[in-house]
Image (tube, rainbow, N blue to C red):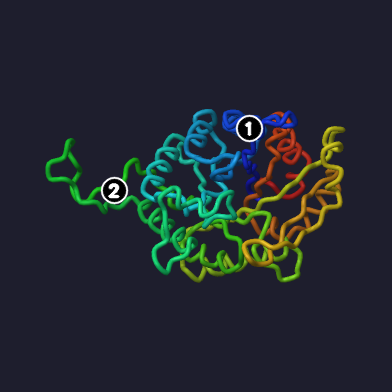
């Protein structure tokens, strides 16, 4: 394991039980948690994107703000739903955020997940063409996004422009060199992991898979990762790909930890029904550090990945989540081969 970061959904609720009671709280606290994670020595700050929900939504203002407050930590998404995106406008936003960060963006994208509203992407002006599914549309948007990130000219210049143009066809600006290699696809199955490799994107695998073969979650996910690596090699890409997995991990090192997570000490995988098919959800890891080190050492997917993203309960506030991150880095990570 080379890198450890956190992944926040950015939930907010006006409930008195929440430390994050408004959208402003969620955004500002996300920046503060990125700063705290960098100070603790973590490698990445990643944020989920959901529309029509009391969660984080438009990622690029947040990523840019976090970039301006940090200097080292990777900043990313996990994941942006490409059904909603204008690929060209997204490429401009992504290029700007990456330049502000000095090349620290790691953008996770995908075809999306179950939503708060029916066909929400239609409200954003995106409608699948005849014979096309919403997943097809997301992949079409993705391909266009990846193409323009290469920085090649494609637009015919105006012969009488307001400002002088460079010669030839024009590309989108600002262009950030190298960002194309830092795009990840959130794959929910073994087949989509293989497709991800064929497209030359890094693999982002979360705490659920949209299939179930009866084996433990971590083993199924390890198989997904191996299929991704095999497909990457077969595609002949020159660079080394990256792979991340997400986990809910809570070392119990204080009375408050015990109060909050003692019920999760015997967590197991769960199998459910999602989007018309079986899905397997990974367990939560909670317990004393020596117990967790032994359990995590047996997680085959963590061993196969280079990046571990800790899903954090952001409504517990910045201080507590910074404590969780620091506890993992201090008590668990060295024993698992981090750095």
- At a point 46% along the width and 41% down the height, the residue shown is 103
Q: Secondary structure at mark 2?
A: loop
x, y percent for residue 3: 63, 46
Residue 46 badge:
none
- At a point 59% along the width and 49% down the height, the residue shown is 116
Specify the quadrant that holds the C terminus.
Answer: top right
* Residue at the extreme front of the image, as rendered: 118
Q: CA distance from mark 2 to mark 1?
A: 35 Å
Q: Residues within 10 Å of mark 1 (few under 14, many from 20)?
A: many
- At a point 34% along the width and 40% down the height, the residue shown is 174
Residue 261 higher or lower than 143, as above or below = above
Pick whichever of labels 2 and 1 is earlier in the sequence: 1
- Front residue of this view, candidates 124 and 145: 124
- Front residue of this view, candidates 32 and 339: 32
The image shows a total of numbered marks equal to 2
x, y percent for residue 99: 42, 37
Q: Secondary structure at mark 1?
A: helix
- Front residue of this view, candidates 232 and 55: 55
Label 2: which residue?
A: 171
x, y percent for residue 236: 46, 67
Label 1: which residue?
A: 33
Q: Residues within 10 Å of mark 2 (few under 14, many from 20)?
A: some
Residue 232 higher or lower than 305, as above or below = below
Is residue 242 something that shows in the picture? no
x, y percent for residue 81: 51, 51
- Front residue of this view, candidates 184 and 297: 184
Residue 191 higher or lower than 320, as above or below = below
Is residue 229 something that shows in the picture? yes
- At a point 51% along the width and 40% down the height, the residue shown is 59
């Amino acid at each position: 394991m080379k890198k450890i970061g956190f992944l926040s959904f950015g939930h907010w609720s006006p409930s008195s039980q929440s430390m994050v009671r408004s959208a402003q709280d969620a955004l500002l606290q996300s920046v503060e948690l990125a700063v705290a994670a960098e100070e603790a020595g973590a490698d990445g700050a990643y944020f989920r994107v959901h529309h029509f929900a009391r969660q984080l939504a438009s990622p690029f203002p947040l990523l840019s703000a976090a970039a301006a407050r940090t200097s080292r930590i990777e900043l990313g998404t996990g994941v942006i739903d490409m059904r909603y995106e204008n690929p060209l406008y997204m490429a401009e936003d992504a290029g700007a955020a990456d330049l502000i960060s000095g090349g620290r963006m790691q953008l996770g994208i995908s075809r999306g997940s179950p939503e708060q509203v029916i066909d929400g992407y239609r409200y954003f002006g995106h409608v699948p063409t005849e014979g096309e599914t919403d997943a097809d549309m997301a992949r079409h948007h993705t391909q266009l996004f990846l193409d323009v990130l290469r920085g090649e000219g494609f637009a015919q210049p105006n012969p009488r422009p307001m400002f002088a143009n460079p010669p030839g066809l024009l590309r989108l600006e600002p262009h950030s060199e190298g960002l194309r290699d830092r795009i990840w696809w959130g794959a929910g199955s073994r087949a989509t992991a293989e497709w991800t490799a064929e497209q030359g994107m890094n693999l982002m695998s979360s705490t659920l898979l949209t299939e179930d073969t009866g084996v433990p979650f971590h083993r199924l996910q390890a198989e997904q990762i191996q299929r991704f690596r095999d497909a990457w090699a077969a595609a002949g890409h020159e660079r080394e790909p990256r792979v991340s997995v997400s986990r809910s991990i809570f070392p119990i090192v204080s009375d408050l930890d015990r109060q909050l997570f003692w019920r999760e000490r015997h967590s197991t995988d769960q199998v459910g029904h999602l989007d018309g098919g079986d899905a397997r959800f990974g367990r939560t890891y909670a317990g004393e550090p020596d117990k967790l080190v032994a359990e995590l050492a047996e997680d085959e997917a963590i061993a196969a990945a280079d990046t571990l993203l800790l899903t954090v309960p952001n409504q517990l506030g910045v201080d507590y989540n910074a404590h969780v991150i620091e506890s993992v880095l201090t008590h668990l990570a060295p024993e698992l081969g981090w750095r």
